[in-house]
Amino acid sequence: MNGRRVKVTIPATTANLGPGFDALGMAFQLYSVVEMEISDHTTVEMMGKELQGTPTDKNNLLYKVAAGLFQEAGLAIPELAIRASSEAPLTRGLGSSAAAIVGALVAANHLAGEPFTREQLFEKATRLEGHPDNAGASMFGGIIVATMPEVPGDPVPYVRFSAPAGLQTLVVIPEFMLSTEKARNVLPQVYSREDVVYNVGHSSLLVAALAQGRLDLMGRAMSDRLHQPYRAKLVPGLNEILDKATENGALGAALSGAGPTILCFFSSDEELEKLRAFVDRVMKGHDISYRVMILQPDENGVQVEIHQR
Ligand SMILES: Nc1ncnc2c1ncn2[C@@H]1O[C@H](COP(=O)(O)OP(=O)(O)OP(=O)(O)O)[C@@H](O)[C@H]1O
Ligand SMILES: N[C@@H](CCO)C(=O)O
């Protein structure tokens, strides 16, 4: 035991923002916490309703990721006392797996004596997730634009910038779960040139609009042809919300990550009021139980506190 307890706070995230499939991410002020210390035997305590049902032994994702980090650092894998909580629901499109992976990597790295830099931890998180969007936003906060490295293990190329002033998000969280794996399995293997060109244009426009605070362009720029049309069959109400959100108060709307959460950007109380009534009509029309949250962007990314015993 090295007498240190590490407490890591990680923001929840959304990915894609419509057309930026596997490339764009944004962090929210909605947090999960991972506490970790070296112990004489492994314990995994999952606190709160959101983490109910996750393993409480060495099969827990947090333990597995932490153990992998010690191994990659060439160190013996220690027994770990792990405690976690999450404000964000799991398997809903708010980046819970990326937050867990980032939290476990950052905590374990501290316990291991910091063998890896933040950039190296981001590369590991990206490798584990299979894409850098949620992981980058959880790690660095703000808005992340990133791609997979050409060679596995190379640094992940990314740019981080702050969310535009005044941008707020209404997230519509259906009660049912949708695993990322299931939502990726419905995507085609091959796309037409027309659809690819469409997304390159829209994603590029969206990044430029976000970087320059051009909220007026969001509605146009957030249109997607690579994943939302295929995932719509898994998310009742998605098509109506995407089609009509801008007529009902939203600056723009998208499926959050792999879904089923839907996000609507807005910037005033008036827009929010209209949007809430619209969303309620659509979800009730499909008999879908859901809750909403109003989230602000997180600009800090992962935060670490070290407690000496
Ligand atoms: N704190 C945690 N401890 C252990 N496992 C977790 C934790 N958070 C998430 N997970 C694991 O991650 C899984 C959810 O990952 P998944 O990629 O399907 O959804 P998501 O990350 O919430 O959504 P998205 O990737 O679409 O944003 C959970 O079923 C659970 O196995
Ligand atoms: N970019 C990912 C995010 C979810 O992990 C997807 O849409 O599948």
Image (tube, rainbow, N blue to C red):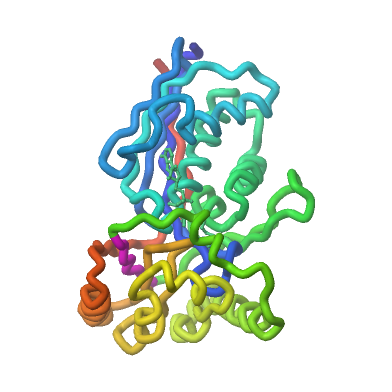
Depicted 214 relative to depicted 81: above or below: below
The location of residue 54, given as percent across then percent down, is: 38, 37
- Kindly identify the residue that appears in the image at 65 percent across and 78 percent down: 200
Quadrant where the C terminus sits is: top left
Quarter of the image holding residue 123? top right
The location of residue 63, given as percent across then percent down, is: 49, 29
Which of 232/136 is in front?
232
- Kindly identify the residue that appears in the image at 56 percent across and 64 percent down: 24
Q: Which residues are magenta?
A: 166-174
The location of residue 185, given as percent across then percent down, is: 55, 60
- Kindly identify the residue that appears in the image at 33 percent across and 40 percent down: 51
Q: Say if residue 191 shows up in the picture.
A: yes
Tell me: 249 left or right of 185: left
Q: Say if residue 272 shows up in the picture.
A: no
- Kindly identify the residue that appears in the image at 47 percent across and 66 percent down: 163
The location of residue 55, given as percent across then percent down, is: 40, 32
Q: In the rendered structure, does residue 88 fall within the stretch colored magenta?
A: no
Tell me: 31 left or right of 24: left
What secondary structure predominates along the stretch shown in magenta? Answer: strand
What is the tally of numbered marks visible in this picture?
0
Quarter of the image holding residue 70? top right
Depicted 114 relative to depicted 184: above or below: above
Depicted 7 relative to depicted 239: above or below: above
